[in-house]
């Protein structure tokens, strides 16, 4: 796993100095080595930080050139089937056993898009084509690995993290207020937006190509979650539950086996839940010795899953390591969040995820994770709360439309006289005015329901949840899963895991998001994924072949953090400094009166505001770190 960056420059630059400065910002992503390359015409530069996983020798160093000399690659990720790909590349003069060289050989033989379609893995890379004088940026199918790009003046600049782009000469860190409104709605900034004007996140499954004048040549999609999900809805897998479990177990076994390919020690995160347990169970079944598993625990029983993880580890016979963390351990991470996540990010489970990554990195360099199971197999409890839409949708649209338009015409402070009840009443009236399920789900998933009212000068842009073309099925469970796969999964869950693990110098692999598993999951009908108020039935059926149901059959907990207690106690002074009206007014991004009102309400005992305030604090702490 690595960090990449680069640019196409129109003016003369001190290329060696600039590209090295950009590359060095990502030393945490690649602590083992660093490399840069500048083309002969002094227009293109590529930089790479290396975390050595396969072929630890210098032969795996990057940027790497193809044998024919036409292509130069800087690459972040892993292609798990690259040795299989090599079997179809006879005659290529391989010098190393690295997957980087396999990509170059495949592109040289078949062209970029055909080569990428053959790759199974997670990746983000930049490919320079000397013959065409183009650079192509590529991001994997599900968005496991990040890549930002955009214009700085007339130049094209890109990088695994924004901190590399910030180092580019002349970068102007103008905050995109419209994207900021999206952050306060979702607690992350969804692709293709970033916190900066002019800088985009690559969308999953895409290739974007620029010429050496920094002009866009083409954008293409080599894999589409939408196409996959629609095909699954239209042509579902028709089989018994046992046959579904058989096929799923076969696909998972292959995906996990491929992700155990490594020249360095590896292990697995284990929470004791269904997803991480199935990964650990199949890993152990494929290993001749105990695998390494890792979990963290909390002394507060409300948040503690460590006992469940230990029970699963004991049953499987893994070599298990656990660390019980204290509130002070968690608090110690808070100052590091802006630098680790690089743009405003408010999912508080980022903190224990980072601590778990640091623990794991003390023992191994690679860890397999269970992320993706909830999205693919309808595991989120919120999916089971959406039946409220059936009640709302029975109210005539004309009545709902009148209610909604009436609320929208009212000033934002119209409900203040109701105190703490005001927002709740307004939110319910908002819901009455909704015409379709996508609006309802977006509202349910929103933190701030009306972020444009307090993000000054903002107009909230469109996202996948506001585009009608993404309403692809009347099956609510399948539709919600699709929305989460193209939004919440890459922009929240995978972003959290990438930054936390790479911040610790650890590579995290996600076998449940092997695209072959995803394509199969899309074909499993909801009736086979959901029974009553239980989801993930196919995963449960596979896991029961390895672990007794009694060890797994319990309510989902997740990584909870006592931020409410922190903000009233340990972090009180820090919060009040960041939220001071004078500071907010001087910065000019968010309405200090609104913030003051909800802070006063929260301090007065209204716990409903704790996560909203955490989002604001994460933005304020990021702003304090990076300015703008």
Image (cartoon, rainbow, N blue to C red):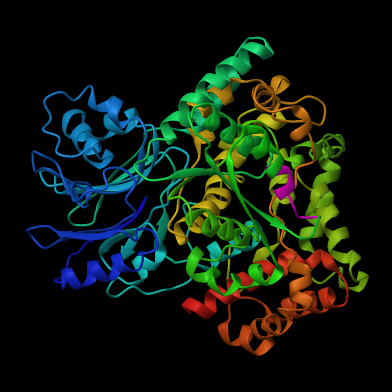
Q: Quadrant of residue 293?
A: top right
Q: Is residue 472 in the magenta section?
A: no
Q: Position of residue 55 (x, y in %)?
A: 26, 43
* Vertical relation: 137 (above or below) 94: below
Q: Residue at x 78, y 67 (%)?
A: 609
Q: Quadrant of residue 467?
A: top right
| Of the pair 10 and 281, the residue shown nearer to us | 281
Label count reads: 0
Q: Residue at x 57, y 34 (%)?
A: 279
Residue 236 in sight here = no
| Of the pair 56 and 391, the residue shown nearer to us | 56
Q: Quadrant of residue 86?
A: top left
Q: Position of residue 472 (x, y in %)?
A: 60, 30
**Residue 328 relative to residue 586: left or right:** right
| Of the pair 170 and 450, the residue shown nearer to us | 170
Residue 72 in sight here = yes
* Vertical relation: 127 (above or below) 350: above
Q: Position of residue 119 (x, y in %)?
A: 34, 32
Q: Which residues are magenta?
A: 302-309
Q: Residue at x 51, y 22 (%)?
A: 251
């Amino acid at each position: 796993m690595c960090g990449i960056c680069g640019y196409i420059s129109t003016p003369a630059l001190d290329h060696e100095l600039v590209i090295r400065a950009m590359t060095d910002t990502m030393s945490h992503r690649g602590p083992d080595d660093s490399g840069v390359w500048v083309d002969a015409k002094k227009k293109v530069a590529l930089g790479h930080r290396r975390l050595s996983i396969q072929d630890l020798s210098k032969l795996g160093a990057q940027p790497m050139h193809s044998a024919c000399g036409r292509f130069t690659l800087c690459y972040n990720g892993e292609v798990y089937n690259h040795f299989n790909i090599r079997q179809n590349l006879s005659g290529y003069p391989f010098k190393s056993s690295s997957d980087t060289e396999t990509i170059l050989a495949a592109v040289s033989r078949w062209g970029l898009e055909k080569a990428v379609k053959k790759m199974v893995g997670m990746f983000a890379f930049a490919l320079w084509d000397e013959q065409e004088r183009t650079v192509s940026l590529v991001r994997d199918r599900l968005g496991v690995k990040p890549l930002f790009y955009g214009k700085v003046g007339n130049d094209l600049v890109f990088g695994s993290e924004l901190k590399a782009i910030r180092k580019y000469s002349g970068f102007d860190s103008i905050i995109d207020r419209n994207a900021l409104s999206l952050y306060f709605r979702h607690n992350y900034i969804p692709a293709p937006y970033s916190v900066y004007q002019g800088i985009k996140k690559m969308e999953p499954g895409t290739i974007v190509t620029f010429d050496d004048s920094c002009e866009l040549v083409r954008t293409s999609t080599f894999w589409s979650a939408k196409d996959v999900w629609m095909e699954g809805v239209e042509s579902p897998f028709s089989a018994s539950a046992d046959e579904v479990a058989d096929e799923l177990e076969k696909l998972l076994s292959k995906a996990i086996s491929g992700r155990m390919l490594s020249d360095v020690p590896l292990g697995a995160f284990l929470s004791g839940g269904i997803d991480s347990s199935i990964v650990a169970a199949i890993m152990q079944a494929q290993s001749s010795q105990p695998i390494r598993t890792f979990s963290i625990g909390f002394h507060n029983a409300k948040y503690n899953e460590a006992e469940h993880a230990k029970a699963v580890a004991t049953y499987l016979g893994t070599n298990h390591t656990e660390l019980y963390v204290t509130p002070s351990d968690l608090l110690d991470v808070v100052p590091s969040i802006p630098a680790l996540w690089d743009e405003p990010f408010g999912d508080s489970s980022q903190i224990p995820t980072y601590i778990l990554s640091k623990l794991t990195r003390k023992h191994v360099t690679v860890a397999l994770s269970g992320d993706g199971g909830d999205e693919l197999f309808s595991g989120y409890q919120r999916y089971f709360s959406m039946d409220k839409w059936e009640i709302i949708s029975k109210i005539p649209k004309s009545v709902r439309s009148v209610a909604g338009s009436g609320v929208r015409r009212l000033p934002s402070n119209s409900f203040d006289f109701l105190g703490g009840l005001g927002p709740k009443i307004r939110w319910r009236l908002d819901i009455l005015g909704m015409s379709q399920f996508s609006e309802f789900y977006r509202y349910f998933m929103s933190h701030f329901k009306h972020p444009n009212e307090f993000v000054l000068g903002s107009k909230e842009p469109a996202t996948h949840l506001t585009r009608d073309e993404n309403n692809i099925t009347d099956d609510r469970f399948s539709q919600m899963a699709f929305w989460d796969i193209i939004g919440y999964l890459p922009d929240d869950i995978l972003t959290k895991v990438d930054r936390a693990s790479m911040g610790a110098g650890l590579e995290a692999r996600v076998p449940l998001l092997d695209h072959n598993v995803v394509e199969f999951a899309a074909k499993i009908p909801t009736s086979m994924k959901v029974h009553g108020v239980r989801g993930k039935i196919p995963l449960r059926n596979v896991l029961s072949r390895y672990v007794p149901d009694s060890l797994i059959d319990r309510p989902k907990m997740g990584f909870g953090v006592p931020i409410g207690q922190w903000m009233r106690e340990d972090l009180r002074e820090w919060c009040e400094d960041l939220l001071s009206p004078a500071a907010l007014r001087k910065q000019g991004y968010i309405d200090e009166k609104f913030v003051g009102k909800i802070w006063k309400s929260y301090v007065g005992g209204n716990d409903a505001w704790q996560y909203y305030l955490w989002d604001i604090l994460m933005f304020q702490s990021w702003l304090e770190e990076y300015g703008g």
